[in-house]
Image (spheres, grey):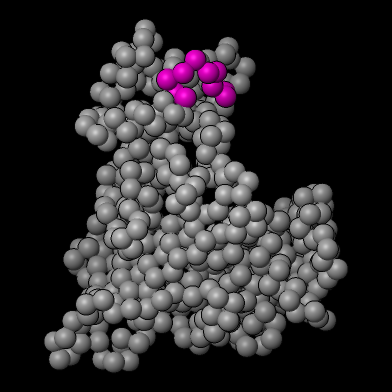
Amino acid sequence: MPSILLLGSGFVADPCLSYLLKRPENKVTVAARRVANVTSLIAGRPNASAIALDVNDDAALEAAVAKHDIVISLIPYTHHARVMKAAIKHKKHVVTTSYISPAMLEYDQAAKDAGITVMNEIGVDPGIDHLYAVKTIDEVHALGGKITSFTSYCGGLPAPECSDNPLGYKFSWSSRGVLLALRNNAKCLVDGKVLEIPGPELMNSAKNIPIYPAFAFEGYPNRDSTPYSERYHIPEAKTVIRGTLRYAGFPKFVNALVKLGFLDDSEVAYLATSAAPLKWRDLLAKAAGVNFTSVDSLEEAVRKTASLSGDDGDRIIFGLKWLGLFSETNVHLRGTLLDTLCATLEDKMMYAPGERDMVMLQHRFTVEFPNGKKEIRTSTGLWFGVPNGDSAMATTVGVPCGIATQLILDGKLKRRGVIAPMDAEINKPILEELEKVGIFMTDAIIA
């Protein structure tokens, strides 16, 4: 009977586990630091069991890996190379949803020599995005066409009826990771030239992204898009951008937080947990370079520091007040401005019971054919979470991961080494299984 070791018990684990347990012959062991964290996940699932495992304990990790046929690593990507090392030693397959890091890629030849598959980048972004990008690109190339421009935007967002806060965003996990990502530098290819965007300017690069008339989206580049000219086999493309999607207004609000210093994660003495209580209005005044005397004067200072004006400025001031930053409420002291802000965001902007999320993903291809004909093609996916059930993000990450795992176990995915879904041989069987469970993108020629 196939035995599967699932490392991690977070949101993504449930839909992945559900998919794998549809096959009655599968046995899944869920590993976490504490067995108590897994109790609810395996409840009512006789083919699932739990073990306590610290992945930093190499001997314990190797012992667990050795007892199973395949390992799914849903823990932070920094641990994947350690997992791969153990799996290669015992000749066990591995699946992750993470981007292939340099540390992971170093194991490519060793994985080939061990005769194992280490499948990566098989969630939604990365994952489903790769599947449908490669699909359309292959179709265009088969017709003799060229992809002159490729843009792709993806966002995990609250469903419209749940986007009821100034950022139009909610957190299903630590807000720190979300905010830190907003400081990353970005690089993309635009009209044949490499465009580099420093982190502090990232939100200024956001632009309207029209997908459906019912939604107002803005998008900005995500990390480094330039390798995708090679990864997607489109050296002819003059523009290659992979970006993040947010509701309109998010980038300008974040930009104000940046100018006020709230994305700074350096230690601040007066924010130490042992410091005296501090009111939010006094902390905001410090961020704006003034002492608090009145709400009106503080508002004026914030507008000046964050360069706020017009309707957008009014909206951002309202949002800061909604968060309580002008109030007498004591801040949660967390040592840094970033972490102190995160504590408040997580108080006010987490998903409430019964609320649902949404994942929106669209590729846009500009195509030219030898006869001079030009087209714009799109691939569009929109998925909603289930109230009080699995989120759209968890489903669109966990199910593709489960599918790839099953295909390896069934011998239908035979490529060895450290791989990602970048060609039809790998992608076609995954696409077929995804469509069977209702996860797909819709292709269209719009011009």
256 to 387, vertically: above or below: above
In the rendered image, is residue 80 in sight? yes
Q: Main secondary structure of the magenta part?
A: loop
Q: Nearer the viewer, residue 411 or 400?
A: 400
Q: Which residues are magenta?
A: 324-333
Q: Quadrant of the C terminus?
A: bottom left
Tell whether 26 sits left or right of 266.
right
Q: Position of residue 113 (x, y in %)?
A: 63, 81
In the rendered image, is residue 112 in sight? no
Q: Classify residue 71 by image quadrant.
A: bottom right
Q: Position of residue 183 (x, y in %)?
A: 39, 43
Tell whether 320 sits left or right of 270.
left
Q: Classify residue 4 by image quadrant.
A: bottom right
Task: Name the outermost residue toward the left.
Answer: 372
Q: Nearer the viewer, residue 55 or 306?
A: 306
Task: Name the outermost residue toward the top.
Answer: 293
Tell whether 184 sits left or right of 40.
left
Q: Position of residue 206 (x, y in %)?
A: 29, 50
Task: Name the outermost residue toward the right.
Answer: 46
252 to 379, vertically: above or below: above
Q: Quadrant of the N terminus?
A: bottom right
229 to 333, vertically: above or below: below
Question: Would you say residue 331 sits in the magenta stretch?
Answer: yes
